[in-house]
């Protein structure tokens, strides 16, 4: 049976989970689908037939990176829960190098950056040393993309800016969360569909797959789409059911549901041909 992999979830240390959920829920009006702990995530997975989930952290301050990555390393030891690492654009080059070396030593395959929480534009010049290090060390980069419901300000991670990153760093394997730009679908089609990057479905499958999303999946290629729920902000089971009940072929659903993610999480990550 093909694995079902949720490429984009969130979990927190037990002592912090309730506070983190309350804070984000207040900002975005979410109804969390589980309690925010790793144990709660694993219970949610078991109830929904999820083989493996990937916890995506966000360091809102540079000083948080060290502690978050040490906790993510503990998360990464679970057989059914893996972790990405946290970096921050404000870290000095030697700190970035130290954290990347640590993540690689723990078998962690990538890092997550979030423009709104970390206050940067993806194509800013100051991020170039960070991107070069990720490229050099063959680490995946998951970028928040599009509208974040917790922020009413200008959208920083637009599809056009992410396209600039792709042009500047062609060897960097990029995953654009929220199907490349949540609620910016015209821009996603214009700037990202058909480009060499992966799109995750985080928070985009609350409703049955729309005709427009089907068209974008077909145009981009099912081998470059990753199932993701953004749980606990999104419901794993509901979104998986919408994927599995879509008009996509069995092969396309298998690609998106876990095969692509499985391949990416192996040692040598590279863009799969469309």
Image: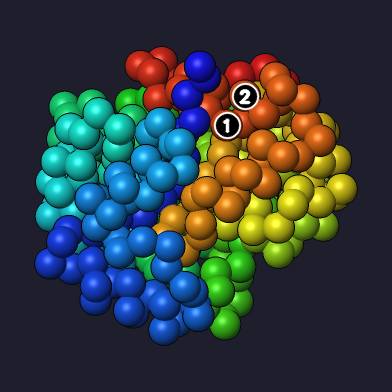
Q: Residues within 10 Å of mark 1 (few under 14, many from 20)?
A: many
Neighbours of disc 2 within 10 Å: few (<14), some (14-19), many (20+): many
Mark 2 falls on what kind of element? Answer: helix
Q: Which residue is mark 2?
A: 254
Q: Residue placed at 41% from the left, 45% from the top?
A: 47
- Determine whether, in the image, residue 224 is placed left or right of residue 221: left
**Residue 51 visible:** yes
Q: Please name whichever residue, 186 or 167, is drawn nearer the observer in this view of the structure.
A: 186
Picture quadrant where residue 187 is located: bottom right
- The percent position of residue 78, horizontal first and vertical second, equals 21, 34
**Residue 98 seen from this side:** no
Kindly identify the residue that appears in the image at 65 percent across and 52 percent down. Answer: 205
Q: Which residue is painted at 52% across and 28% down in the image?
A: 258
Q: How many marks?
A: 2
Q: Which mark is residue 24?
A: none
Residue at 47% in and 24% down: 3
């Amino acid at each position: 049976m093909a694995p079902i992999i949720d490429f984009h979830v969130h979990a927190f240390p037990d002592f912090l989970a309730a506070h983190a959920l309350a804070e984000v829920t207040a900002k975005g009006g979410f109804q969390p689908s589980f309690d925010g702990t790793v144990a709660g995530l694993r219970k949610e997975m078991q109830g929904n037939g999820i083989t493996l989930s990937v916890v995506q952290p966000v360091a809102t301050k540079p000083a948080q990176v060290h502690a978050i990555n040490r906790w993510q390393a503990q998360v990464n030891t679970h057989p059914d829960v893996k972790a990405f690492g946290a970096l921050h654009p404000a870290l000095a080059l030697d700190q970035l190098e130290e954290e990347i070396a640590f993540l690689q030593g723990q078998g962690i395959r990538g890092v997550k950056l979030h423009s709104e929480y970390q206050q940067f534009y993806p194509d800013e010049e100051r991020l170039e040393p960070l991107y070069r290090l990720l490229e050099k060390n063959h680490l995946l980069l998951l970028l928040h993309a599009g509208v974040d419901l917790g922020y009413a300000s200008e959208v920083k991670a637009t599809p056009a800016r992410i396209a600039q990153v792709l042009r500047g760093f062609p060897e960097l394997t990029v995953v654009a969360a929220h199907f490349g730009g949540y609620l910016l679908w015209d821009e996603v089609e214009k700037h990202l569909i058909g480009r060499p990057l992966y799109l995750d479905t985080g928070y985009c499958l609350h409703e049955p797959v729309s005709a427009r999303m089907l068209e974008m999946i077909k145009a981009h290629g099912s081998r470059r789409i990753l199932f993701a729920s953004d749980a606990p902000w999104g419901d794993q089971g509901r979104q998986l059911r919408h994927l599995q009940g879509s008009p996509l072929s069995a092969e396309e659903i298998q690609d998106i549901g876990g095969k692509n993610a499985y391949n990416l999480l192996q040692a040598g990550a590279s863009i799969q041909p469309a």
